[in-house]
Amino acid sequence: MNRSLWFGLSIIPFFSLVACVHVTTISCGSGRCDAPPPPLISEEDQDSVSPEISGGQSKVIPSSHPPATVITGGPDTAPLCQLSPPIPTWQKQDNSAWCWAASTTLIINHLEPNRPLKQCEAVQMTLAPKRKQYEEEVLRTTGKVVSIDCCLVTDQALEQNPGGSDDDNVKASKAVCHTTFRPEWAFNALGYENRFQIVRWPLDRPGPRGLTWDELTDQVCSNRPFISVKAWDEGGTHTEAITGYHYDPAGEMVDLDTHGMDRFYTIPFNEYQGKPGEYVHVRDYYDIGL
Amino acid sequence: MSATTMISASNWLGRWGRIIAVSAIMLGPWLTPVAQADVPTVNISSVLSHLGPPPGDTDLFALNAVKKVLQRLVKKPDGSFDAPYASRLGFDLPLSDPANFVQQARSSFPISVFRIGLRRLQQYQPGHPVQGNLLTLLAADTNWLFVPPPSLFLAPQRFLYAITVLDNATNQPVVHSSVRVRVAFSSVGPIPDNLDYAIERIGSGALIRQVDKWRRTPDTTGPINPDYFLVWIPALDRYYLGRFHDKDLRITAITDDPQVGLREGKEADAQEVFQRLKAEALTINADDPDAPPR
C-alpha cells in the first residue's frame, strides 16, 4: 500500500468524527435550524444596551413611519416589498473610519425624513462624553481651550481646509472624532435607546450566520433598513445597510449600501450570511426604531 | 514562538539547539501564516505580465448574468420596469424607454480582481526577500485558480465585468454598471477543465466607471489597456489599478486618495503606495473579528 493511500485511509475516521460532531451540532430539536440564537450581548454592549430592557419594550410602530411599498404580481409571483420612500442616494462614509456613522445616518434619515441629520452630526452627538473629557483634559494639561467639532474632520472638510491641520481645534477634533465605533452607541445617543435589536453571530456557530431570509424580508416589509457587520478573513470589520431584496430563480438577492467605493450592489443571499475565505457575518442591528 | 523562548530552549539543548534556534529565527519570516496557502510568486509574475481572457466560459456566464439575472432584477413583480433600482445599480437612464435601454445591456471588458487582506498588508516589509515581494501581496490562494506543476494551471479567480450599453450616437459601448464573477474548480469533473461560476455582486456603478476611466491609454478616451488588473483592499475600502511595467508593479489611483498622496489617475511605484497603506493598515486590530467597524 503506498504512503498516500495509507495516509488517506488513516484520516477517514477523523473526518467521520468531524462529520458526526457537525451533524450533532446543527441538528435542531425544535423550530427552524436556521433561526438565529437569542441575541448575544457582550459585556461592553450591556453598558449601553440592556438586553432585558431591549427585549421587554412594547413595540409601537411610530404613526409617522409609513409602510413599505408592496408590489404584487400574478398568482405565481411573490410580492416584493420596497422601502418607502426609496433610499434617495448613497450614503458615502465621510471619512475612512465612519462606516458605523454612515450606516446609522442612512437609517435614521430613512426613519425620520424630517430630521436633517448629517454623519458628522451623528458622530458629534455619539462622542459627546468623549469630546467633553478630551476638552477638559486639554484645558487641564495645557491651559488651552479647544472646541471639538467632528464636522471639521470629514474628508471634504479637510480637503477644503488643507492648512487646518495646524489648528488646535482641528487637531483635537481629529484625535477624538476620526474613530471607529459601534452603531449601538450611535443609536443610543441619537434617540434610539432600546429601540433596536442586536444579534451577534459567534464565530464558532455552525451553519449560516445572519438573519434568515424570512427575517430579512420582514425587516424590509416593515419599511426598516438594517445594519449588518462583516469581518474580513484577514482582519478588519465593516458595516453595511441592507436596503432591499429580490427573489430570483437563480437565488435570492440582497441589496447593500456599502458607504464606500462600491456604493450600492446586490449579492446572493447566502453571501450576506458570509463568504468562506473572504468574510464572516458577525452582527446585525435590526428592528430599528421599534 | 518568540525568539526569547527559542534561545532559552537552545541553552538547554546545547550547540545543536543553538544552531536550530538561530535557523528558526532566520527562517521565521518564511514560516509565517502569509507564506501558507500562497501561490508561488514566480508563477504569478508570468500571468500578470501577460493577462489573458478569463478562463473557460466565464465570459458566457457573465453575459447570461446580465441578460437574465439583471433583467429580472429590474423588473417588478407586476412586470413594470423598476427605474429607481436600475439607477441605483448604476444605469444612467434615458428619459424615453429606459426599460428597453437596460435590455440592451451586455457584459464587457473584464478585469481581474486581486484581494489583499489586512494582515498580509500589515506584514508587508519593503526590502525583505519574501514579505517585501510585492507579488506576495497578491499571492493568497483565494485570488487564484491554481494547479501546481507538472500540470501547471494558473488563472485569476475573480473578474469584474463592465455592464455596457451601446451608445447609438457614437456607436461605442458606455459603461453603466458591473457584475463581478467568481470562478472555482468544479467539485465534479476533471480539474482544471471543469469550472463553476458564481455571481458575486451586481451594481457598483461608480466603481466600474472609475475603473473604466483610468484603465485606458494614453488618456481616458483611449482604448482599454489590457495590462491592468484591479487591486482590492477591502479592510481599507480601497481599489487601485495595477500593472507590470518593465518588471515593476505600478499602482494607479482611481479616485483621489489623500491617505497615500495620490490624485485620481496618478500612477506611482507600488512599493511607495503599499508602504503608506501598511501604515494605515497597522491602525486596525486584525485579530479581533468583533472590533468596532470602519
Image: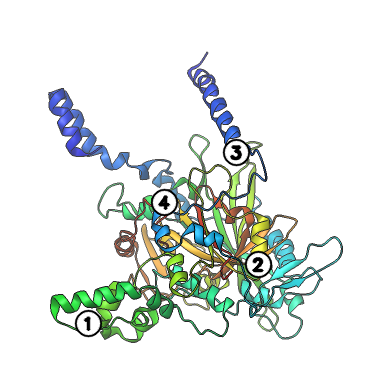
Query: In the image, B285: left or right of A88?
Result: left
Say if residue A94 shows up in the picture: yes
Chain identifier of the residue bearing label 1 in the image? A
Identify the residue under disc 4. Answer: A234
Crowding at label 3, few (<14), some or many (≥20) Cα neighbours within 10 Å? Answer: few
Q: Mark on residue A220?
A: 2
- Quarter of the image that includes the C terminus of chain A: bottom right
Spatial CA distance of label 3 from label 1 is 56 Å
Within 10 Å of the Cα at label 4, are there few (<14), some (14-19), or many (20+) other Cα atoms?
Answer: many
Residue type, label 1: Asp
Q: Residue at x 53, y 76 (%)?
A: A108
Image quadrant assignment for residue B74: bottom right
User: How far across and down, in percent of the image, does residue A15 sit?
Assistant: 54, 27
Which residue is denoted by mark 1 in the rendering?
Answer: A168
Q: Amino acid at mark 3?
A: Ile
Position in image of residue A141 (x %, y %): 14, 75
Residue at mark 3 shares a chain with residue at mark 1? yes
- Give the numbered dot on residue B140: none
Say if mark 2 contacts mark 3, CB within 8 Å: no
